Image (cartoon, coloured by chain):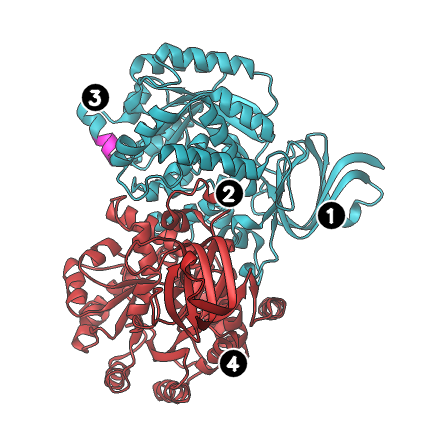
Chain colours: A red, B cyan
Amino acid sequence: MEKVDSLIHGRWVVPVVPSGQILENHCVVINGSKIIDIIPSNEVLGLYQALHESHLGDHLILPGFVNAHCHAAMSLFRGIADDLELKTWLEQHIWPLERKFVDEDFVEDGTNLAIAEMIRSGTTCFVDMYHFPQAAARAVREAGIRARIGLVISDSATAYAATTDDYFNNGLDFADRYKHDPLISCHFAPHAPYSVSDEPLKRMRVLSTELGFSMHMHIHETKQEVDDAVKADGMRPLKRLEQLELLTPDLHAVHMTELSIDEINSISENGVHVIHCPESNMKLASGSCPVNELLNAGVNVALGTDGAACNNDLDMLSEMKSAAFLGKLTAKNAAVLSATTVLEMATINGATALGLEDLIGSLETGKQADVIAVDMSKLELQPLTNPISQLVYSSDRSQVTDLWVAGKQLMKQRQLTTLDVEEIINKAQQWRDKFTD
Amino acid sequence: MEKVDSLIHGRWVVPVVPSGQILENHCVVINGSKIIDIIPSNEVLGLYQALHESHLGDHLILPGFVNAHCHAAMSLFRGIADDLELKTWLEQHIWPLERKFVDEDFVEDGTNLAIAEMIRSGTTCFVDMYHFPQAAARAVREAGIRARIGLVISDSATAYAATTDDYFNNGLDFADRYKHDPLISCHFAPHAPYSVSDEPLKRMRVLSTELGFSMHMHIHETKQEVDDAVKADGMRPLKRLEQLELLTPDLHAVHMTELSIDEINSISENGVHVIHCPESNMKLASGSCPVNELLNAGVNVALGTDGAACNNDLDMLSEMKSAAFLGKLTAKNAAVLSATTVLEMATINGATALGLEDLIGSLETGKQADVIAVDMSKLELQPLTNPISQLVYSSDRSQVTDLWVAGKQLMKQRQLTTLDVEEIINKAQQWRDKFTD
């Protein structure tokens, strides 16, 4: 009889790997930060004795979601400027607010708000791209969630960094301080081809190889971006990045709504990962990423919510549903982008993009115990025929009841164990009052 | 001091008419089935004394949603055949199941399930299109919700009607029995141009004028439907309906993903209402309705969820969000299909399509008290800047806490007052067990 930390029994366990598998009445066995076994619940007795045992008889147990792209702190700008064209939204609303208000406190409070929302909707790991990474990291540590924090690079001066050198120095200094953190890792986050010039991209490319950091960049978000680049540089942004030798398995290309067949083949051949943000692309009228064609070409496509300032939540459950809906419409084929496929995009594909596929993204023995439980007993899911389909197409974030990261329970029956929701809400309201003064 | 039935105090009241208005700390005053006043909460004392008083200090009070298109009873088929092409889905799954199982009990149990879901997500009136209207009406009466029930017409024999004559006779007999019901009204529901021939459509046209019934029909759902009609009839379905003199303000054209500029002008000139079902159109890869162009042409566009067998819920909150997202993407303009616009589509535009705009669809003195309350205090909506935007883009169905139809409270703090949720779930599971035997 082995002594372990936790046993999580579920009516269904969907490990994601192998694809589409649904185990009934199974138990996830956790010791320390790791999953050490997944067995039928009726075989546990005599094998394992646990400090904590969760009997979730109406629940689906699955790996936590990997939100592969967001700007966490921008949650404080939620709803502040909706239903505007991208240019107006950025130039007349978001950038002036950022210049006036974004500092370490803003980032820490905003990231706290974002993490609380992500935990409450089943995300156990997120990829962040914003200024003041040290403030974001403090929020991540306090919450106990897993994060990949981007070291932003831009040609523009901000309160965070006055020069390109500052971006590199601040970022690398931060990365060095967190290099042994078990839950926080870093990568480069150059803003976009139009906002970062060749020299810093070349410098980043060299450092990326030296440090083993991936590179995470908004690319081909809109047709306008591509057309403008052709006018300015005589070539499409992807071509320029190819010439700079950025098209490698270390690159996360976020958005990618404008892609020729040749470009799809090129990113496939070069092992570039695509991060798809369907709700952002729809709400900002950016365009449709050809996800089905990318998957058919063998490209790894992960899923992100983008920031709550544009989109207006960080809810991976609704993002999965939107990915399936938009993917089917774009491909003109209702049979593609199935519930199983978008669930993989929201879990193991995100882990793969981060190079963490041996640690997270599925429930497998030896992996980190990043686990969520979703209550499937609600009327809105009845009659329950196929748990994966009902998870993607019929459930909502309020059904996510429990969540663990590296074996530690961060939400228990909808109550957060590490964060104070009331305090987070109060701080968010104080920030709003400052913006609207 | 006037004695009244109910006072509903809300932090915000959004009456929908006038467009975009947000009243703070107001009270909706209800007597009998009607709204008799809307005034600031601090002016109520001394004016009204109520039997029931609801203080909803964190809530947004607004008119209940009008779900302008669904197939309620099909909720029993939820999740039974997802991620399939439309033809496979219908011919190999839904139609065989319908032939084998659909009877009065199926329709009553399925409609109960659908109504419970709709009440829990803020719908106070729905438009139904399915067989055995008398069974659906029993469920509607038991629940106390408002409904427009379609008298289905089809060329195909079903358990409900063997011939076209049967469809008319069964439907008209039903309509006659419910003609004085305060909450149930009827209209014709010919399935689609490809499934109803000219003679029954002509007969329906005459009866529609005689009885004052509108006509509710799937039209131009897919490009395939239009192409097939051109091959078979030498003209597009809308042209054929025009020749049959069906293009009038009595017609609800459901779906309409394939429309030329001439067709948009024609339906505008003829006052045809369009019912938009964005999530169904996406999940079945049917196409994109050009909603912004229709609105610009002055067409009344209402919103429906379609049936939960294809789509897989009856949630008007998520349907509004999808309508805004898809509408912006289709129009290539992030500034159109604003939160205010899609909220109108989900309320007053639905009422207008039904010819009930003097009764429902907004909170106005003299109208029926079809009212909902949405809790806006949740972390996912913070910081709360714009209540209409946050309602559409950031809230979810679990935040709808209270609902009234014609002044009667059907949901109180998430508890249904007229329906037994456990019993409905049990029956749904029994039906699933029959299907999968």
Chain label for disc 4: A
How far from the left and from the top, in percent, is residue A257?
28, 59
Depth-wise, is mark 4 or mark 2 nearer the camera?
2
Q: Mark 4 sits on what residue?
A: A104
Query: How far apart are the two marked residues, 2 and 3, measured between alpha carbons?
Result: 44 Å
Q: Secondary structure at mark 4?
A: helix
Q: What amino acid type is highlighted by mark number 1?
A: Pro
Q: Mark 3 sits on what residue?
A: B233
Taking depth in this image into account, of A157 and A166 the one nearest to the observer is: A166
Magenta: main secondary structure = helix
Query: How far apart are the two marked residues, 4 and 2, measured between alpha carbons?
Result: 44 Å
Disc 1 to disc 2: CB gap under 8 Å = no
Q: What amino acid type is highlighted by mark number 4?
A: Glu
Q: Which residues are magenta?
A: B223-227
Query: How far apart are the two marked residues, 1 and 2, measured between alpha carbons?
Result: 37 Å
Q: What amino acid type is highlighted by mark number 3?
A: Asp
Q: Mark 2 sits on what residue?
A: A379
Query: How far apart are the two marked residues, 3 and 4, measured between alpha carbons?
Result: 68 Å
Query: How far apart are the two marked residues, 4 and 1, measured between alpha carbons?
Result: 41 Å
Depth-wise, is mark 1 or mark 2 nearer the camera?
2
Q: Mark 1 sits on what residue?
A: B40
Taking depth in this image into account, of A99 and B93 the one nearest to the observer is: B93
